C-alpha cells in the first residue's frame, strides 16, 4: 500500500514534491514550506551512488537525483531520458 501511495497519490510527500518541482518551484522553497520529510530527496543520491558502485545503469534515478540536486531541470532530464538509444534490457 505504501509503495502505491508514494508513486500515485498527491498526498504522498514524494509525489507532491515532484509535482511542485514539475510546476517550476524551487526545491528549497518547497522544503521550506513542509514539516515532513520527502525521503526521495535524501535517498536519490544514495541510490545513484549504490548503482554506480555495482555498475548498474539507472537513468531515471540519475535524472531524479540531478533534478533534486539542481544539476538539471525537468525538461533537460526528460530530453536526456528520451534521447537514450533503444536497447534490450535484461535482468
Image: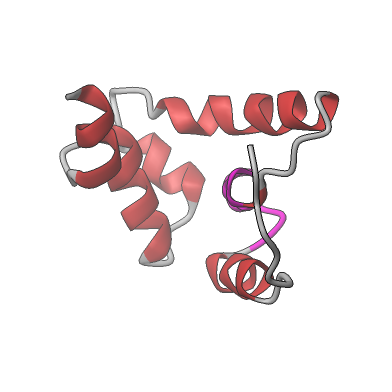
Q: Note whether 29 is above or below 13 in the view shown.
A: below
Q: Based on the picture, tell me whether residue 66 belongs to the magenta stretch.
A: yes
Q: Quadrant of residue 22?
A: bottom left
Would residue 36 be found to the left or right of residue 60 on screen? left
Image quadrant occupied by the N terminus: top left
Q: Note whether 32 is above or below 53 in the view shown.
A: below
> Magenta segment range?
60-72
Residue at the spot 83% in from the left edge and 33% down from the top edge? 55
Residue at the spot 28% in from the left edge and 24% down from the top edge? 35
Question: By what rule are the colours in the image chosen?
Answer: secondary structure
Image quadrant occupied by the C terminus: top right
Q: Position of residue 15 (x, y in %)?
A: 30, 44
Q: Based on the picture, tell me whether residue 16 belongs to the magenta stretch.
A: no
Q: Position of residue 59 (x, y in %)?
A: 66, 51
Q: Is residue 66 visible to the viewer in this orientation of the structure?
A: no
Task: Tell which of 8 and 87 is nearer to you.
Answer: 87
Q: Position of residue 9 (x, y in %)?
A: 17, 43
Task: Tell which of 87 and 1 is nearer to you.
Answer: 87
Residue at the spot 38% in from the left edge and 45% down from the top edge? 30
Q: Is residue 60 visible to the viewer in this orientation of the structure?
A: yes
Would residue 17 be found to the left or right of residue 48 on screen? left
Residue at the spot 20% in from the left edge and 34% down from the top edge? 5
Q: Magenta region, mostly helix, strand or loop? A: helix
Task: Tell which of 36 and 60 is nearer to you.
Answer: 60
Amino acid at each position: 500500500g505504501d509503495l502505491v501511495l508514494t508513486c500515485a497519490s498527491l498526498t504522498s510527500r514524494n509525489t507532491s514534491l515532484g509535482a511542485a518541482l514539475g510546476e517550476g518551484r524551487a526545491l528549497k522553497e518547497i522544503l521550506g514550506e513542509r514539516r515532513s520529510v520527502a525521503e526521495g530527496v535524501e535517498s536519490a543520491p544514495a541510490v545513484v551512488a549504490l548503482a554506480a558502485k555495482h555498475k548498474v545503469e539507472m537513468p531515471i534515478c540519475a535524472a531524479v537525483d540531478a533534478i533534486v540536486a539542481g544539476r538539471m531541470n525537468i525538461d533537460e532530464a526528460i530530453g536526456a531520458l528520451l534521447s537514450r538509444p533503444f536497447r534490450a534490457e535484461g535482468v
